[in-house]
């Protein structure tokens, strides 16, 4: 019996960076929750953006935002594992020296970037509908616990991060590809799979009583931790290989049709 359902958003339910979710999802989610099934949205997005996509059912679901490192339920958020301040500051300095790279610092409730007049800021604010605050420069770092850092590059984010990993961060921080242009940086053993396990632990749910849906590399831990993992047919090959079943993508409402089978 399925007691918990966890799903990615971008590339799985909707096109990357959009708010274009089929409203039928809300009706189905409400019915699933009425049946006693826990519904969790897991995303690299910040909570401020997830709120806008899932506003009609926000009071009924769990959210594992920032790649699962921040859990929110009924308006209360907590970071599972924070990045040490000194590591965050050093990584930020490295970002500032890389040509074409832009960065984001996340806390449990806020999102910061160095400058507001950049292509990345416009993407986050206008496309993803994040509430982003410009700090006024790379040297301005907030005195808060960091839940996640994100590197953005319009062409080769993944390759740039491989260079960083080969430096001093291997084994200290984990680099998770999230779409073509983004790499999310978190503490090791933090991710959507960790979030699924933590929620199950809190609620007394066995892993085999869960299912998960995803499309990208940052969804693999969630898919592998769940009792059954689904990848959409537009997913990366690595994600498809990790899944138990491949289903149609968002254009064909693949996840929605599977959800209906549990009503």
Image: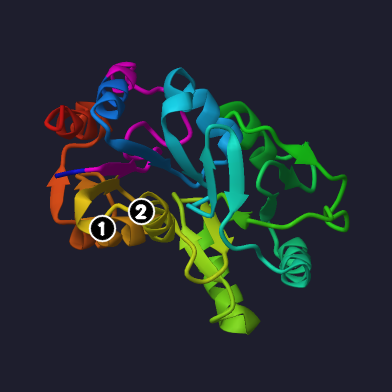
**Residue 32 relative to residue 165: left or right:** left
Q: Is residue 19 visible?
A: no
Residue at x 35%, y 53% (from the top left corner): 200
Q: Quadrant of residue 92?
A: bottom right
Q: CA distance from mark 1 to mark 2?
A: 7 Å
Which numbered circle lies on residue 207?
A: 1
Vertically, is 20 above or below 220? above
**Residue 93 relative to residue 158: left or right:** right
Residue at x 65%, y 47% (from the top left corner): 108
Vertically, is 12 above or below 93? above
Which numbered circle lies on residue 200?
A: 2
Which residues make up the magenta segment? 3-27
**Relative to the observer, which residue lies in front, 232 or 4?**
4
Vertically, is 231 above or below 19? below
Q: Residues within 10 Å of mark 1 (few under 14, many from 20)?
A: some
Q: Secondary structure at mark 1?
A: helix
Q: Where does residue 228 sit, x and y in percent of width and height? A: 18, 53
């Amino acid at each position: 019996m399925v007691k918990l359902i966890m799903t990615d958003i971008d590339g799985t339910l909707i096109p990357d960076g959009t708010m274009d979710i089929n409203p039928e999802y809300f009706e189905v989610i409400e019915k699933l929750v009425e049946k006693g099934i826990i519904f969790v949205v897991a995303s690299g997005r910040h909570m401020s953006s997830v709120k806008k996509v899932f506003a009609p059912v926000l009071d009924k679901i769990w959210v594992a935002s920032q790649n699962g490192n921040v859990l929110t339920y009924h308006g209360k958020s907590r970071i599972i594992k924070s990045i040490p301040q000194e590591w965050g500051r050093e990584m930020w300095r490295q970002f500032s020296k890389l040509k074409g790279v832009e960065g984001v610092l996340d806390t449990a409730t806020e999102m910061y970037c160095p400058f507001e007049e950049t292509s990345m800021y416009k993407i986050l604010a206008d496309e993803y509908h994040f509430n982003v605050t410009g700090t006024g420069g790379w040297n301005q770092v907030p005195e808060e616990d960091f839940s996640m850092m994100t590197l953005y590059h319009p062409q080769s984010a993944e390759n740039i991060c491989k260079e960083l990993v080969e430096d001093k961060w291997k084994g200290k921080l984990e680099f998770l590809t999230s779409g073509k242009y983004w790499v999310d940086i978190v503490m090791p053993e933090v991710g959507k799979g960790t979030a699924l396990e933590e929620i199950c632990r809190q609620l007394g749910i066995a892993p085999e009583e869960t299912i998960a849906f995803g499309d990208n590399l940052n969804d693999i831990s969630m898919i592998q931790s769940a009792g059954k993992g689904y990848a959409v047919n537009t997913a990366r090959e690595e994600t498809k290989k990790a899944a138990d079943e491949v289903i149609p993508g968002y254009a064909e409402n693949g996840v929605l049709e599977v959800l209906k089978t549990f009503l």
